C-alpha cells in the first residue's frame, strides 16, 4: 500500500489494524526506553550534562551564521568542498552532478535522515546511479521498498520473521529468523558493494565549527566503510547540526548516545577532518559537505525555533504513547513521533502538516526525556494555535467549539449540559463504558471505549466536601 496517498486518519487506521507492527514498535520502543533508564541510572552526571547540552544548543543557534561560516572555512582549509543547499532540489542536484562528473555508477550509503528528508536516493536512481543502503535497518527497508519508521531504528516496525521472509524472497537465501544469521546474510551481500562503490554518502551527527570536523556515530562498521573506501565521500548535514568546539562535542556525544540506545558509548565514534592527505593509506580522494537549509532558517525565526535544538536521539518517540500505538509510518513524514509533529510542520509548512501537532496526548513524557530539554508540549500547543488561526480546523469542530464556548461562559447552562450528559451516557453505557458514539464522536470509539460521565461532577463533589469536611 502506498502510504503517501492516504490521509493522516487513514494512515492511523491502517497502523492500528496491523497488530504485528503495533507489537514490534511497542516492544522495541519500550526496550530502548528501559535501556536508557538503566544507562542514566549508571551515569549520575547525566542531568548536569543535559543542562550543559541545552546551553550548547541554545548558544550555537543564537550565533548560527557565525558558526556556520567558521565551520565551512575550516572544512575548506582541510581540503574539503562545501555546498550550501537552499532546499532539497539544490542538494540533490549537486550530488547528482557530482556523481555525473565523477563517472559514479554505484553509491553506498550509511544511515542519514537528511537524505531521507530530501529523497536523495530517488534523485540518484533517476539519474541512473545505483544506490545501496548499508545500515542493516536501512538495507532491510530498501529491500522492502518502504520508508524508515524510526529515526535511529528504521526497521522497528518489522519482526525477525518478516525480515527472514524478505531476505528469502529478495536475496534467495534459506529462511531464518536468527538475527546473527540474518546479519551474516546482509554482510555477505554488502561486502563487495563497499569495495566497488565510487561514492559513499553519509549524514553528519555534529559538525565542529572550530576544526571543520564531521562527527559520525554508528553501531555498525558500515559508516566507516562508506566514508573511507569509495573515492568520493559526500556528507549531508542539516544546517543546525553544529557544535562550536570539540569540547562541546565531548558533552553532546554521551548525551546523544545514552538517550538514543542506552549505550554508554556508541560502538563507532568517527571524527573526519578532511579527505585523504598525501601519504595516508586510506580515505576518500574528495570530501564534499552539503549544508542543507530546507526550511531551517525560516523555522529559526518562528516561535517553534526551539525544535532545532534536537539532536535526533529518538528518545521522545520511544516514550510517546501515541508513537508506540501507531508507529512511525502513520505520521507520513520521515520525522515521526513528538519530534516529527513539530519539526515537520516547522520545516515543510503547517498547511500540509497541520494534523501532526494534534497527534499527541500532551502527557509531557517527551519533554521529560528529551536530552536537550525541548519543551515539545508547548511547541505542539503553539502549532495547534497557529493551525486553528490559519483555519485548518474542520467545520464540525469549529461549530462544536463555538457551541462549547457559548455554554462554558454560562455556568447554569454548563451545569445543565453536564447533568444531561451524565444521565444520557450512563443510560447508554454497558458496565460504565460506551463502545460506540455517533459521528463525529465515533473517532474516539472506533479504537477504544468511552467512559460514561460520572454521576456527580467534580464541582458537586468539591462543594459537598467543603460543606461536610470544612463547614464554615
Ligand atoms: S526532540 Fe529531544 S528527545 Fe526527541 S529526538 Fe530530538 S533530542 Fe531526542
Image (cartoon, rainbow, N blue to C red):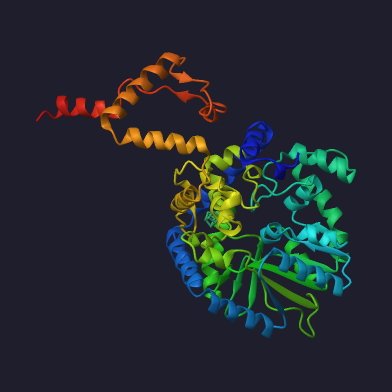
Q: In this view of the protein, can residue 35 be seen by the observer?
A: no
Give the percent coordinates (x, y) of residue 391: 51, 47
Give the percent coordinates (x, y) of residue 12: 62, 37
Give the percent coordinates (x, y) of residue 128: 88, 61
Foreground pick, 169 / 464: 464
Q: In this view of the protein, can residue 442 be seen by the observer?
A: yes
Q: Tell whether 437 sits left or right of 163.
A: left
Report the number of numbered marks: 0
Foreground pick, 265 / 129: 129
Q: Tell whether 287 sits left or right of 231.
A: left
Foreground pick, 137 / 344: 344
Asked if 175 appears above or below 369 in the picture, the reply is above
Give the percent coordinates (x, y) of residue 33: 54, 46
Q: Quadrant of residue 428?
A: top left
- Of the 4 image quadrants, the one containing the C terminus is top left
Taking the image as four quarters, which one is ligand 1 found in? bottom right
Q: Quadrant of residue 266?
A: bottom right
Q: Residue furthest left?
A: 472
Asked if 297 appears above or below 158 in the picture, the reply is below
Q: Residue at x 44, y 46 (%)?
A: 364
Q: Tell whether 393 sits left or right of 453.
A: right
Q: Residue at x 83, y 70 (%)?
A: 99
Q: Tell whether 454 sits left or right of 345.
A: left
- Of the 4 image quadrants, the one containing the N terminus is top right
Foreground pick, 370 / 346: 346
Amino acid at each position: 500500500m502506498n502510504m503517501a496517498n492516504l490521509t493522516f486518519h487513514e494512515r492511523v487506521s491502517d497502523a492500528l489494524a496491523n497488530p504485528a507492527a503495533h507489537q514490534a514498535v511497542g516492544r522495541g520502543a519500550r526496550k530502548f526506553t528501559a535501556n536508557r533508564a538503566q544507562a542514566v541510572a549508571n551515569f549520575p552526571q547525566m542531568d548536569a550534562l543535559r543542562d550543559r547540552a541545552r546551553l550548547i544548543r541554545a548558544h550555537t543557534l543564537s550565533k548560527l551564521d557565525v558558526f556556520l561560516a567558521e565551520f565551512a572555512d575550516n572544512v575548506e582549509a582541510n581540503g574539503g568542498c562545501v555546498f550550501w543547499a537552499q532546499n532539497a532540489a539544490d542538494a540533490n542536484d549537486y550530488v547528482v552532478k557530482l556523481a555525473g562528473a565523477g563517472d559514479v555508477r554505484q553509491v553506498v550509503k550509511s544511515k542519514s535522515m537528511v537524505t531521507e528528508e530530501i529523497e536523495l536516493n530517488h534523485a540518484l536512481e533517476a539519474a541512473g546511479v545505483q544506490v545501496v543502503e548499508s545500515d542493516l535497518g536501512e538495507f532491510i527497508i530498501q529491500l522492502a521498498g518502504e520508508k524508515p519508521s524510526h529515526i535511529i531504528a528504521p526497521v522497528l516496525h518489522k519482526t525477525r520473521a518478516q525480515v527472514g521472509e524478505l531476505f528469502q524472497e529478495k536475496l534467495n537465501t534459506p529462511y531464518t529468523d536468527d538475527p546473527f544469521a540474518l546479519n551474516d546474510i546482509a554482510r555477505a551481500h554488502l561486502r563487495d558493494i563497499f569495495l566497488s562503490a565510487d561514492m559513499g554518502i553519509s549524514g553528519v551527527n555534529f559538525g565542529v565549527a572550530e576544526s571543520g570536523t564531521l562527527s559520525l556515530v554508528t553501531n555498525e562498521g558500515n559508516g566507516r566503510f562508506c566514508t573511507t573506501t569509495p573515492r568520493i565521500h559526500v556528507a549531508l548535514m542539516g544546517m543546525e547540526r553544529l557544535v562550536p568546539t570539540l569540547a562541546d562535542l565531548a558533552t553532546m556525544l554521551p548525551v546523544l548516545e545514552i538517550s538514543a540506545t542506552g549505550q554508554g558509548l556508541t560502538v563507532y565514534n568517527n571524527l573526519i577532518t578532511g579527505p585523504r592527505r598525501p601519504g595516508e593509506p586510506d580515505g576518500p580522494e574528495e570530501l564534499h559537505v552539503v549544508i542543507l537549509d530546507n526550511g531551517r532558517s525560516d523555522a529559526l525565526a518562528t516561535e517553534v525555533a526551539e525544535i532545532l535544538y534536537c539532536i535526533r536521539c529518538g528518545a521522545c518517540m520511544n516514550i510517546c504513547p501515541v508513537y508506540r500505538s501507531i508507529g512511525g509510518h502513520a505520521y507520513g513524514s520521515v520525522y515521526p513521533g513528538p519530534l516529527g509533529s513539530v519539526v515537520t510542520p516547522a520545516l515543510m509548512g503547517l498547511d500540509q502538516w497541520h494534523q501532526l501537532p494534534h497527534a499527541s496526548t500532551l502527557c509531557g513524557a517527551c519533554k521529560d526525556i528529551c536530552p536537550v530539554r525541548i519543551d515539545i508540549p508547548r511547541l505542539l500547543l503553539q502549532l495547534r494555535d497557529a493551525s486553528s488561526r490559519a483555519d485548518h480546523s474542520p467545520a464540525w469542530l469549529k461549530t462544536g467549539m463555538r457551541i462549547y464556548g457559548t455554554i462554558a461562559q454560562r455556568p447554569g447552562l454548563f451545569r445543565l449540559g453536564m447533568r444531561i450528559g451524565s444521565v444520557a451516557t450512563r443510560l447508554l453505557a454497558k458496565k460504565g463504558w460506551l463502545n460506540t458514539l455517533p459521528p463525529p464522536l465515533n473517532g474516539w470509539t472506533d479504537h477504544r471505549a468511552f467512559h460514561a460521565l460520572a454521576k456527580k461532577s467534580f464541582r458537586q463533589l468539591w462543594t459537598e466536601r467543603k460543606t461536610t469536611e470544612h463547614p464554615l
